[in-house]
Image (cartoon, rainbow, N blue to C red):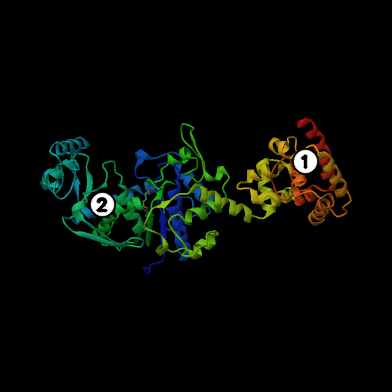
Amino acid sequence: MSDRPVRVRFAPSPTGPLHMGGVRTALYNYLFAKKHSGTFIIRVEDTDQARFVEGAQDYILDAMKWCGIMPTEGPGLGGDYGPYVQSERKGLYRPYAEELVKNEKAYYAFDTSEELTKMREQAKEMGMPNWQYNSVTRGSMQNSLSLSVDVVQSKIEAGEPYVIRMKMPRNVDVRFNDEIRGWVVVNTNNLDDKVLFKSDGMPTYHLANIVDDYLMKISHVIRGEEWLPSAPLHVMLYDAFGWEAPKFAHLPLLLKPDGNGKLSKRDGDRLGFPVFPTNWTTSSNEVYSGYKEKGYFSGAFINMLALLGWNPGTTQEIFSLDGLVEAFSLERVSKAGAKFDPDKTKWFQQQYLRATENSVLAELLQEKLNSDHDLTVLSGLCGLVKERATFIGDLWEEGSFLIERPTNFDEKTARKKWKSDAPTIMLEFKERLDEIDDFNPENIESVFKSFLEEKSIGVGSVLPQFRLLLSGKGMGPSMFDIASFLGKKETNERLEIGIKVLATQNA
Ligand code: GLU
């Protein structure tokens, strides 16, 4: 590790909402920064004005806030290296591009986009489909390397639009040690003369990214694998400026659940799971669903994401955010793509819901129902059914009968279990229950057991019927817990009412 203080950045382009892969990149940056007592920065890379999407920047920051992975430097957050939005830094980049031209690392190119298209087409006709502006072709193009100084000067004075291109040297091996992939070596013959500065006065991603990483004293660049092909150019740029390059770590791709290709924005709603942290509404009012609105806890979502491409080296799967900070290292990030697993994501949510205090679940349920149910009652309800729930809404689906008397009795169970002798058995059982003073689960269970013994009947002749009468359902938590929760009076009344209703339902 470099001995520079750790400063990492998440550098999204506001071209749309933040996809799950982007959240994971932000998360790994956050974890790495915290682990090394460093600084986590967000920088908005909006140099491509044509792809700018209104609302995306706010969405990204709000989503990161929901995830609990807020940077400490960034737009609206303060920091000594701002502004943190590239369009607000516009004036700053040109001198850097000019410096490269002066040092013969870059050059002016006057070729119009029509001329470039024509060139590509001609090359294609001649059997070269992948024409590139590079060390071989640049000599026959319109640029400050092929034209005389006077011509170049007069073109600039005449206000002809031009770009500044990187002068990629011929046949040089560019090498860097990626923290995840090890040594990466690329020969410059495979690289083209990328545009660094555009004719609209804006830098391209490449130049702005390098200049800002340098000015913001970024120590480690942790980003998605899709940027790996750009890394050799970035290394060359650091070299051209004479700056120390940050360390690079290129994260593995997130793959579709079947492992076939990259998880894309379109996969989500198509395959039945969200790919965005929170809902995203397009300008034409189309809504893409988010984990938050689907009912996921941010902790569960983050925990799941952390393990997509990283592993702690143990079998532990449940980690708090602090636990992740503690355990995280780039060495344990894998090179291979990580398959997204929607079922496992649900499993994480289940584990988080189960581990949440009943009183907290009760408040969340109260809020979801927008009701004024007593919180102690709701808390008891949550305790009884949380093992059967994944989302807050499930708690009510599973447990509403604990507050509201059933009006429907599960037909299948009624047909199978409500035989002709059931009313008599249940009335008798009701009488035994009535004799209990302290209506707690243990007492109810022991009365239940002696009742079975005394009548020489099996569990199946009482328990499913008991459940049906009290809850209307065929399955659920322990009946002794349910009856105790309802109390003796309510249990009695439900038994009476249920027996009457079932007499008509099954008639
Ligand atoms: N703006 C780039 C993106 O949208 C950032 C890549 C990088 O981190 O260098 O992902």
Q: Earlier in the sequence, mark 2 or mark 1?
A: 2
Pointer 2 residue: 97
Q: CA distance from mark 2 to mark 1?
A: 79 Å
Q: Residue at x 42, y 63 (%)?
A: 332
**Which amino acid, mark 1?**
Leu
The residue nearer to you, when weighing 445 against 415, is: 415
In the rendered image, residue 414, in percent from the top left (x then y), is placed at: 73, 37
In the rendered image, residue 192, in percent from the top left (x then y), is placed at: 21, 49
The residue nearer to you, when weighing 475 against 143, is: 475
The quadrant of the rendering that contains the N terminus is bottom left
The answer to which image quadrant residue 365 occupies is top right
Answer whether labels 2 and 1 touch (C-beta < 8 Å). Answer: no
In the rendered image, residue 44, in percent from the top left (x then y), is placed at: 41, 49
Q: Residue at x 50, y 65 (%)?
A: 326
**Which amino acid, mark 2?**
Ala
What crowding class fits label 2: few (fewer than 14 Cα within 10 Å), some (14-19), or many (20 or more)?
A: many
The residue nearer to you, when weighing 422 against 112, is: 422
Q: Residue at x 29, y 52 (%)?
A: 230
What crowding class fits label 1: few (fewer than 14 Cα within 10 Å), some (14-19), or many (20 or more)?
A: many
Q: Do we see residue 149 in this rendering?
A: yes
Disc number lying in front (2 or 1): 1
Q: Residue furthest front?
A: 456
Q: Secondary structure at mark 2?
A: helix
Pointer 1 residue: 469
Q: Do we see residue 167 in this rendering?
A: no
Q: How many marks?
A: 2
In the rendered image, residue 453, in percent from the top left (x then y), is placed at: 82, 53
The answer as to whether callout 2 falls within 8 Å of ligand 1 is: no
Q: Secondary structure at mark 1?
A: helix
Q: Which numbered circle lies on residue 374?
A: none
